[in-house]
Structures are given as C-alpha cells and as structure tokens.
Amino acid sequence: MVRLSIVGNVYINDLSSSSIMHVGDNINTALKTRVFAVQREVPFYYGNEGSFKAYPFYQRPFPIPQPHEPFTMCVDNLGSFIRVQNIRILGVSSSSILQIGCNRITSGETRIKNIRQFVTDKPGPKEKTTFVKLGKEEGVGFFEANPQQ
C-alpha cells in the first residue's frame, strides 16, 4: 500500500558512513560500509597496505537469519497517511537507515577491521600499560606537571 508520509520536524546531529534518512516509500535499500583502520604508535606506513582482499573477513557472506517456525502476519493500515510529529536523533551511522514510510527490501552491511600496532620495547612494567618517566625517580608512571620548572 502506498501512503503519504507527513513529517513535522526531524532533527539529526550526524548522518554518516553509508547511512540514509528517507521520508516516503521505497522499494529497495542497500547499505554497505567497509572500514580498514590502522593505528600505529610510530606513524610509518607502507604503500601497499589496506587491501580488503588480504582479509577473508571481508569476503565471507553474511548469514541471513531465518525464522525458526512459519508465521502469519496481519497488518492493518488505517488510513492513507503516516504521520510523524517530531523525531530527534543523535546519530545514524555505519549502514543504518532512518525511514519514515514503507520499504520492501532492506539490506545493510558493516564490516570493520581495526589494527593497532604499538612499540613493545619501551621502559616500564612488562605486560602492563607503558608509562614514561620524567625527571624524578618517584616511580614508573610519574608525570611532572611542568618539567621546565
């Protein structure tokens, strides 16, 4: 059933990363986000980094959930309008959708791979957070407020 969407106010602070804000009817919505992030303590980057093909995580098919048992659904659309007064959203991100209206098919996909590489040969206790000693011998992790004084 095609209906008219009547919206008063929509306030969105952030809409990003393959996300959609849609008012009205739609037949198909396909969302996709792929992220490959490398964070290094020492900013040295090679030219051949960041290939999605190097990680099978990005090639695996997403499992589509199936209902455990058959079900019957009955929808009563009273009237030909979808009325929305006010919507306040902080953020719509990473293959998400905010839709006011009808949609037949929606598919969304987000795959994120974060790599963090830190220097291991630093002073400090092993197997714990590495601290930097400044000035005095008051213990590992001591930071002076102003080392110039």
Image (cartoon, rainbow, N blue to C red):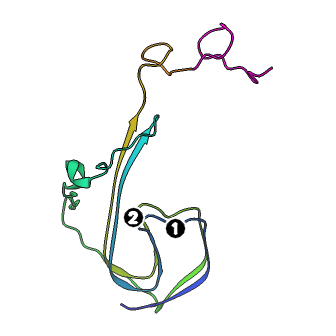
Q: Position of residue 107 (x, y in %)?
A: 30, 69
Residue type, label 2: Ser
Vertical arrangement, residue 104 with respect to residue 54, above or below: below
Secondary element under disc 2, as helix, strand or loop, is loop
Q: Report the disc number at residue 95.
A: 2
Left or right of residue 72, residue 139 in this image: right
| Residue 124 is one of the magenta-drawn residues | no
Dot 2 surroundings within 10 Å: few (below 14), some, or many (20 or more)? many
Left or right of residue 8, residue 101 in this image: left
Secondary element under disc 1, as helix, strand or loop, is loop
Nearer to me, 101 or 41 = 41
Vertical arrangement, residue 149 with respect to residue 136, above or below: below
Q: Which residue is mark 1?
A: 15
Dot 1 surroundings within 10 Å: few (below 14), some, or many (20 or more)? some
Question: Considering only order in the chain, which callout, 2 or 1, is on the residue closer to the N terminus?
Answer: 1
Displayed quadrant of residue 25: bottom left
Residue type, label 1: Leu
- Give the residue drawn at x 42%, y 27%: 119
- Give the residue drawn at x 40%, y 37%: 116
